[in-house]
């Protein structure tokens, strides 16, 4: 169970005391538990939406988003801000892009990207609550945490001494592919709306991977974090928008 606790400690602010320092293999195996941690986050968000059902949706959506950010410690938002700054400030140059990513300060583009993603998430959460579709909150962090598995399985890690390079090297690939497939197929539970959202999610993942390879020849921890945030937002948007269009075409 140590890999599970490693994943929980890394991906959330939930206090976890490891019994010992994990080795490289255990760190790599912890990646297999990322979707499970995403499921746990999703269940917390869904439970929160149920507890806040008597509260106006504007306030509920705000509290859910704040708890969501707090639960993850803003880990992936930090990666999003660093990646956005580096992408604009790097001017297409690989080394400059990587150097900016390592800069701890956040530039204006990074701030704007955070505002845009948080605003879109907030609006989508509000619409989910309004349409009594809060169950989808379980799927979003779940699908988001399968992104690192797929990227580590399919894309080179750029930094020589980065944690991700060791994770990718020792990651049990068959188990990782099986878990990824099971998580992706879970969206079929939501029928046509889920299928459409899955197609948009996969398209977004393929496109982001293409951009990373084109600019820096692979991925970093920051680009993985950015991918999680962008694809969670894309998943929310695609689910909400597909619902409206399906309703329109059904003539209701």
Image (spheres, rainbow, N blue to C red):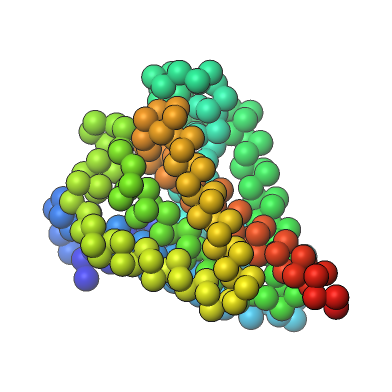
Q: Is residue 92 left or right of residue 170?
A: right
Residue at 67% across / 58% down in the picture? 237
Q: Is residue 118 left or right of residue 227?
A: right
Is residue 109 in sight in this rendering? yes
Q: Position of residue 191 (x, y in %)?
A: 59, 77
115 or 142, which lies in front?
Answer: 142
Position above or below: 197 against 120:
below
> Which quarter of the rendered picture does the N terminus lie within?
bottom left
| Corner quadrant of residue 129 | bottom right
Position above or below: 241 against 118:
below
120 or 9, which lies in front?
Answer: 120
Residue at 71% across / 78% down in the picture? 132
Q: Is residue 187 left or right of residue 146?
A: right
| Corner quadrant of residue 251 | bottom right
Position above or below: 115 against 51:
above
Q: Residue furthest right?
A: 251
Position above or below: 135 against 217:
below
Residue at 23% across / 62% down in the picture? 174
Residue at 23% across / 57% down in the picture? 173
Q: How many marks?
A: 0
Q: Position of residue 96 (x, y in %)?
A: 43, 18
Is residue 48 in sight in this rendering? no
Q: Position of residue 103 (x, y in %)?
A: 44, 26
Q: Position of residue 193 (x, y in %)?
A: 64, 70
Q: Is residue 44 left or right of residue 164?
A: right
> Which quarter of the rendered picture does the C terminus lie within?
bottom right
């Amino acid at each position: 169970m140590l890999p599970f606790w490693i994943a929980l400690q890394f991906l959330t602010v939930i206090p976890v005391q490891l019994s010992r320092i994990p080795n490289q293999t255990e760190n790599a195996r912890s990646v297999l538990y990322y979707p499970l941690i995403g499921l746990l986050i999703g269940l917390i968000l869904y439970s929160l939406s149920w507890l806040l059902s008597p509260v106006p949706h504007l306030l509920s959506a705000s509290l859910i988003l704040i708890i969501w950010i707090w639960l993850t410690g803003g880990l992936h938002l930090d990666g999003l801000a660093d990646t956005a700054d580096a992408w604009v400030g790097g001017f297409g140059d690989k080394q400059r892009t990587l150097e900016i990513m390592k800069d701890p300060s956040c530039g204006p583009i990074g701030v704007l990207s955070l505002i845009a993603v948080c605003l879109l998430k907030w609006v989508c959460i509000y619409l989910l609550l309004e349409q009594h579709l809060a169950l989808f909150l379980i799927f979003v962090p779940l699908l988001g945490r399968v992104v690192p598995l797929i990227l580590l399985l399919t894309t080179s890690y750029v930094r020589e001494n980065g944690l991700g390079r060791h994770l990718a090297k020792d990651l049990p690939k068959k188990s990782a592919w099986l878990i990824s497939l099971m998580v992706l197929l879970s969206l079929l539970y939501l029928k046509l709306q889920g299928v459409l959202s899955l197609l948009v999610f996969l398209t977004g993942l393929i496109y982001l991977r293409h951009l990373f390879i084109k600019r820096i020849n692979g991925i970093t921890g920051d680009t993985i974090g950015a991918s999680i945030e962008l694809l969670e937002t894309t998943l929310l948007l695609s689910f909400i928008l597909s619902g409206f269009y399906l309703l329109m075409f059904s003539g209701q």
